[in-house]
Image (cartoon, rainbow, N blue to C red):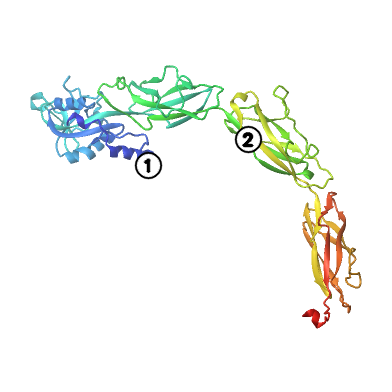
Amino acid sequence: MGSNKYMSVSRCHWLLVGVLLMSCSKFGNAHDVECPVDWEEFDNFCYFLDNTLRSYDDAQADCVANGATLTSIISSLEQTFINTNFLVSAGINIWIGLIDKMTEGTLEWEDGNTYVAADSNFRAGQPDNGAGGDEDCMHVYDNGEWNDVPCSTTLGYICKMKRTHFRIESAQYIGKEGSMLSITVHRDGLIANNDEITLTADVPTTDTATYGTDYSSDTGATETLTFNPGDETVTVDYTLTADDDLDDLMFFTLTLALSGATMTGSTAGVYASLGSPSVTQVFIHDCSFMFWIDPVYIGDECDTMVEVVVHRCGYLGNTDDKVEIYTSTTGVTATAADFTEITMAAATDPVDTEVSFAKGDCAVAHQLSLTPDDVVEGMEYFEVVIDRVTGTNAAKGTVHTVLDTAKVFILDHSTIFWIDPIYVGEEDSMISIYVHRTGFVGDPATVALSLGTPATATLTDDYTVGTVPVVFADGDIVKEVVIDLKADDDIEDTEYVTVTLGTITVASATKTALDAARDTATIFILDRSCKLYPKNVLG
């Protein structure tokens, strides 16, 4: 077995590890690390069978040269593993790392484990120190039974290597400026040694945070982490520096590396490696925040209140972030008579109207008062403007440059009645007149409709209705009125009569009006007579 066989891990092995790490496999610990190529893993150790025939001392030297020892077998489970994975396929006797060279009859494992006779698997009558009392080295037969033979015998052998690997707990950490962030490094596998590794704050070109300015640790950009016997984790604390700058989310990179001091506690070597992840990115929340407001709201003056919502995005951990708002009537259609104004305070004045955010709030509602009146008017609007950030952390806050203003439209809650302007009918027929209602249609209402002057047609002779009430139920927006046009024997030109909307009666609302441009209509009545004209006139 040459030394170049031991310490490389094939690409396909690493791909396999990646697949296992991404799944919740039932086949083992997700943090297990592959042994070197051609080695077999069992219980945090790596094993290698070499069929090259060597003396005991040469076999042990070859194992040690590659960070291992001749194998110990300290449990029935380990014996079964070796039988199944190596002895059946080898078909030859194999050295194990058990000797009584120092004191005859006192057996010792090469890797320092304590020999326990009850856990041994010697063939019956063995060890017998035969061959003239020179059988000081142990081997196993292909059936798994142990025996002692002279150490000069040449056999195949199994090397056993302790295995340890290190990993960072997470591939990503998130902290906020002005706080401490703990990074945890794990040691898996063999944890009985004193081990050292390094955690370095790299500065690749992609990093946006700077060591010493945005973050720091007690001992510098490179931390040496010491694992004492039994330690499974070591924690490193980083200070994330606070400032008043408005920064984007920043990050820096930490890289785990094996140091020269790793494996100092091992007498026979350890297969130490880096697990996954060995690199992590640390993101720093800037603790800055921004306020904005929804751009459009619609209120009804009869409700007297409209609610606007101010939003906070970015860092939400502060308990007293505040923003000042005011209302504007510049360039709008509503006036101070339509709502309760919030005047803009000068920078040195006491805060006029503040919207306060508690920890975790991302939106806070604020109510504005609307003033009802008896004036029939169209939809009006005014503006609500976010003015400035106040509160203890004002330096870290800003206002959105586009979503800083909202338009608040006020529904007038008035009702307008109107009629289509032209109708044409024939005598001796029925004609339908349509009265419309727009605006607020939530109340029953009645509007008077009358036929009269100016007119060439006359009541009784040409039509039958003088005045009729047009009744609107709750929700009605148009009503039909049917007029009876009478017939006569007179031969006459087309006549007309004027339809006029009049008195409005509404159950609860007082804001009603007639559309001044569409409150009358004309009905033209075709005569249905035929006049005779001289031939020279008709042509």
Residue 360 lies, in percent from the top left, at 60, 32
Circle 1: residue type: Lys
Q: Is residue 130 left or right of residue 398?
A: left
Q: Which residue is mark 2?
A: 292
In the image, residue 245 sits, relative to residue 490, either above or below, namely above
Q: Is residue 104 left or right of residue 171?
A: left
In this view, the residue in front, 521 or 57, is: 521
Which mark sits nearer the N-terminus, 1 or 2? Answer: 1
Q: Secondary structure at mark 2?
A: strand
Q: Residue at x 31, y 19 (%)?
A: 261
Residue 405 lies, in percent from the top left, at 66, 36
| Quadrant location of the C terminus in the rendered image | bottom right
In this view, the residue in front, 278 or 287, is: 287
Question: Residue 536's image quarter?
Answer: bottom right
Residue 26 numbered tag = 1
Residue 229 numbered tag = none
Q: Residue at x 84, y 69 (%)?
A: 483
Q: Is residue 25 visible?
A: yes
Q: Is residue 503 left or right of residue 252?
A: right
Circle 2: residue type: Trp
Residue 116 lies, in percent from the top left, at 25, 27
